[in-house]
Image: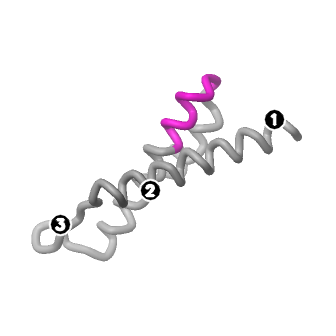
Amino acid sequence: MPEATKLPLAVKDTRLGLETGAIVALAQRLLGMLKVRDPLSDTVHLGKGAALLEGLRGAGRSFTARWVQKSA
C-alpha cells in the first residue's frame, strides 16, 4: 500500500487520478478493517453509503493534493 498512495498524483489524467485516489482510500479502509476483524467470523464489508463516503474522501484528497502540487 505505500506505493499505491503515490499513484493518484503520478497519473497524468485528472479524472483517472481522482478515481485512483478513491480506490486507494477504499483499499486502506478495508485493510484497516481486516487488521481488527476476522473475515471468517466477522463482517468485513462496507455498505453503499460508507463506500461512497470513503470514495469521495479519497477523490477529495487526491484533488486537493493535485491542486496544491499544481500551485506550488
Find the magenta span and give its range.
12-21
Kind of residue at disc 1: Lys
Query: Label 1's element?
Result: helix
How many other residues sit within 10 Å of disc 1, few (<14), some (14-19) or many (≥20)?
few
Up the image or down, 67 lies above or below 26; here it is above
Residue 41 position within the rendered picture, expressed as x and y whole percent measured from the top left: 11, 73
Position of residue 69 in the picture relative to residue 24 (left or right): right
In this rendering, the answer to whether 41 lies above or below 69 is below
Q: Which residue is mark 3?
A: 39
Residue 14 in the magenta stretch? The answer is yes
Q: How far across and down, in percent of the image, does residue 25 sit?
A: 47, 52
Q: Earlier in the sequence, mark 1 or mark 2?
A: 2
Q: Tell me which secondary structure the magenta stretch mostly adopts.
A: helix
Distance CA(mark 3)–CA(mark 1): 41 Å
Label 2 CA crowd tier, 10 Å (few <14, some 14–19, many 20+): some
Quarter holding residue 28: bottom left
Question: Is there a contact, CB below 8 Å, between mark 2 and mark 3?
Answer: no
- Measuring from the top left, give residue 54's x and y in whole percent: 45, 56
- Which residue is found at the position 81% from the left and 35% from the top? 70
Please give the residue where the numbered disc 2 appears in the rendered image: 53
User: How far apart are the two marked residues, 2 and 3, measured between alpha carbons?
Assistant: 22 Å
Q: Within the magenta stretch, is there residue 51? A: no
Q: Is residue 7 above or below residue 30?
A: above
Q: In the image, what residue occupies the spot 45% across and 49% down?
A: 55
Q: Quadrant of residue 32?
A: bottom left
Q: Of helix, strand and loop, which one carries label 3?
A: loop
Q: Which mark is residue 15?
A: none
Circle 1 residue: 70
In this rendering, position of residue 5 left or right of residue 72: left
Nearest to the observer: residue 7 or residue 17: 17
